[in-house]
Amino acid sequence: MTGRGTDTNVPDFWDEVVDDMEATAAEYRENGWEPIEVHPGDITPLPPDHERFGLDVLVPDDEFETVSAAVGEPDAEFDSVEVFRASTRGTVFLVVAVEDEASGRVVLVPAFYVVREASEMLEGTRSRGELPIHLRTLSNDEVVTFEPSDPTPLLPAEQN
């Protein structure tokens, strides 16, 4: 997986990040949760002056529909976030687990960003105290947004 302008080390580690997401999903499943895994096609850090500030994650239509249906349920409260983070050579890799404890569902989103290419997003995160994660399809006509209450685990370790 290489998005526009990404470092060449991303493909070297992306498969490992997806494997980590799948292993995390298996752990959740063993503990009685219903994991919803997404497999991004592209991930873009959006600066504060963009209409959707944060991490923009392009996902397949069928996975988006599953997430959208789960989030749209009347009692859904995906309000707890666990972040698994690793960094290497200026790139931050994430597996974000957004939990709805009442329903037993968890949305798992693997992501990455190159720190130097995401500098505006990171500055916005520090000034606003937030880093939304937007899931969307290619048509971009619907968006599901998760807003972790604490963006710190999404930031590079050296910037915490």
Image: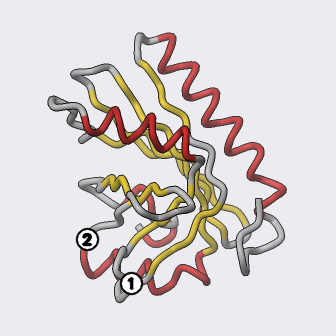
Would you say 46 lies left or right of 17 here?
A: left
Q: Residues within 10 Å of mark 2 (few under 14, many from 20)?
A: some
The way the protein has been coloured in the rendering is: secondary structure
Q: Nearer the viewer, residue 64 or 80?
A: 64
* Disc 2 secondary structure class: loop
Instruction: Give how far across and how far down residue 141 sits, in percent.
Output: 41, 62
Whichever of labels 1 and 2 marks the residue nearer the N terminus, that label is 1
Instruction: Give how far across and how far down residue 110 sits, in percent.
Output: 58, 48
The C terminus, quarter of image:
bottom left
Instruction: Name the residue located 32 percent from the left edge and 77 percent from the top edge.
Output: 126
What residue is disc 2 on? 129
Instruction: Give how far across and how far down residue 29 sits, in percent.
Output: 50, 15
Instruction: Name the residue located 35 percent from the left edge and 35 percent from the top edge.
Output: 69
Picture layout, residue 3 above or below residue 78 = below
Q: Residues within 10 Å of mark 1 (few under 14, many from 20)?
A: few
Q: Tell me the quarter of the picture where residue 123 sits.
A: bottom left
* Disc 1 secondary structure class: loop
Instruction: Give how far across and how far down residue 118 sits, in percent.
Output: 54, 79
Q: Amino acid at mark 2?
A: Gly
Picture layout, residue 59 above or below residue 126 = above
Instruction: Name the residue located 23 percent from the left edge and 31 percent from the top edge.
Output: 73
Residue farthest left in this picture: 75
The N terminus, quarter of image:
bottom right
Q: Nearer the viewer, residue 108 or 60?
A: 60
Instruction: Name the residue located 46 percent from the left edge and 66 percent from the top edge.
Output: 55
Would you say 110 lies left or right of 69 here?
A: right
What residue is disc 1 on? 50
Q: Tell me the quarter of the picture where residue 92 sits.
A: bottom right
Q: Amino acid at mark 1?
A: His
Would you say 46 lies left or right of 129 here?
A: right
